Amino acid sequence: MKISLKFQEVPFLVGDIVWVNQPCLVAGQQSYFQGEIMQIILDGSLMSTSAVRLRAENYELVMSQVIYDIKPSGDHAGMPRISINVALAPGQKTLFRTRAELLTHQRNSEKWMS
């Protein structure tokens, strides 16, 4: 059997400053924070493990998620690093390039839910 890897686009790189759509471990804080990506972990957990169940000559292995290790910065500088699990499938938005982009996403999500 030949196993091939399917290339996936990872939207952010080590060193990028991003806005994270979740609180920064502190109760009562904003629902988001800014941080720097320190490392990217290719998730090999059981959730993303592939199982071959049918006889096949060729099998394509697809990485479906990554973990971003983020060091909070800005208002949250000095807080411990946080690991953010991000699905690479379109539609899930957890990390954003700008605060404005994150706030627009949050407003649109609130409209959709109401």
Image (tube, helix red, strand yellow):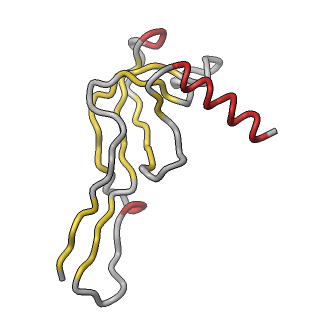
- Residue 75, placed above or below residue 92: above
Position of residue 110 relative to residue 100, above or below, is below
Picture coordinates of residue 43, whole percent (x, y): 33, 51
Q: Quadrant of the C terminus?
A: top right
**Quarter of the figure with residue 46:** bottom left
Q: Is residue 52 left or right of residue 1?
A: right
Residue at horizontal 51%, vertical 23%?
24
> Who's the residue at 75% across and 40% down the image?
112
Q: Position of residue 64 (x, y in %)?
A: 39, 56
In this image, 13 relative to 84: left or right?
left
Residue extending furthest bottom? 55
Q: Residue 14's quadrant in the figure? A: top left
Q: Find residue 99 and report its horizontal and vertical position in percent.
A: 52, 19
Q: Is residue 102 left or right of residue 36?
A: right
**Residue 97 rendering spot, x and y as whole percentages:** 44, 25
Q: Is residue 54 above or below residue 21?
A: below
Q: How many marks?
A: 0
